[in-house]
Image: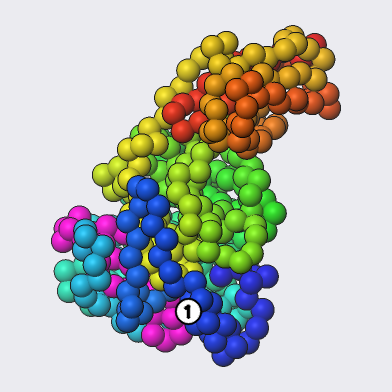
Amino acid sequence: MKKNKINLNLKVQLIILILTAFIFNISKAQPGNYNFNMIDDSLYYPIDIVYDTLYKRYLVSNWGDGNGNILVINTSGEVIDNFFDGLDYAGGMCIIDDILYVINNGDLVGGSLPSSIIEIDINTGKQLSAYEICNSCYLNLIDTDHEGNLYIPDQENGKIYKYNIANHSVTDLATNIVDPFGLCYDESNNRIVFTSGTFQTSKIISVSVYGGEQTILATFPYGYLEGIIKGDSGNYYLSSWGNDFPWGNESIYMYNNSFTSFIKISTNHNRPFGLCYRNDTLIVANWGDHTISFIDLSPFAIKEFDNLSDFIEIYPNPNKGEFNLNISDFMNKKITIGIYDILGKQIFISEEKVMTPNYKKSIDLTTFHKGTYILKVQSKTGIYRDKIIIQ
């Protein structure tokens, strides 16, 4: 999946993957999650999941070497059928009308075989066509703008392609990207929002559907980000492979619409990848332990409140860049402290566990310019916001 993770020959790689899956093949259910394992391994290495509204079922793409496939999962989370066979290293999927589009990588990162987009009839499960996207590439999760285009990240070459379905043309939408894994179409801004990650930090970046300048929306400080999807409320949900070993305790995160704050909404995943949003439920393909998780999002409805005075004292304020937060609420709770400039760019972030009734946090922003900044303190119950003035 990543260049620094896949550096052995194919046979050795597959042996390691099988052993890894055996070691971690334990489903760890969390509140709000419904996880399941298929003991016959029919759920192979799940990459992506989409919901078929026509037949009221989920379709899951499975990674393999000549034996990759797409499985049918019902709304109770049970594998009930094999929808399509003969894939290699399957990637992202997207349904438009009654056609399923699925990525099929002929090889792993570093290989020379082509990667293609395959069109499959939703009604019959029969392949309609296949079109080559690129050689010596590795394609990940995809999305559509519902205007006849698919957007496809190429991890190996650091690009995002725009694929026109009608004429099968492929153009470079964005280039010079570090490991693009997931993307989604943001209809309200007519842009593509994508993840770009390293083992240390990741970025969430946007680019217009017409190309042009890339805009960094947020920097994520806890390692790899993989899949990304936008929910009906405007929040974004992201899967992460984190930045520590061994794998098996990775998390799912939620960002607000402006990417100024985020919270962790689910843990104990094993290398989560593709995401599906439906009816205030997030469905996660866990590549590492062959499971699918269903996460109830209703407990994570976020309210925003102006003025922190009832909960947090900022002193001194105004200040010269050094100040303290005295937190008198959120006892035994995790909070995220974020500070943003007037353009919304994040300049400081810290996760804290409040262990005392009057928790103190000292912050140093002396390297930043004078001006007004926005402080946001986020818990599971809300986002609390106030101004900081540096003189």
Element type at mark 1: helix
Residue 272's x, y, as percent? 47, 60
Residue 245's x, y, as percent? 64, 64
Residue 256 located left or right of residue 222 = left
Around disc 1, counting alpha carbons within 10 Å, would you say few (fewer than 14), some (14 to 19), or many (20 or more)? few
Residue at the outermost front position: 356
The residue sitting at 75% across, 26% down in the picture is: 363
The residue sitting at 83% across, 24% down in the picture is: 366
Residue that carries the numbered disc 1 in the rendered image: 22
Residue 310 located left or right of residue 61 = right
Residue 49 magenta-drawn? Answer: yes
Q: Nearer the viewer, residue 355 or 128?
A: 355
Q: Nearer the viewer, residue 118 or 89?
A: 89
Residue 82's x, y, as percent? 25, 77
The residue sitting at 78% across, 12% down in the picture is: 319
Against 81, residue 235 (above or below) is above
Q: Which quadrant: the C terminus?
A: top right
Q: Nearer the viewer, residue 195 or 38?
A: 38
Q: Can I make out residue 150 in this image?
A: no
Q: Nearer the viewer, residue 368 or 192?
A: 368
The residue sitting at 57% across, 90% down in the picture is: 11
Residue 239 magenta-drawn? Answer: no
The colouring scheme, among rainbow, by chain, secondary structure or one colour, is: rainbow
Residue type beneath disc 1: Phe
Magenta-colored span: 46-73
Residue 145's x, y, as percent? 38, 49
Q: Main secondary structure of the magenta part?
A: strand
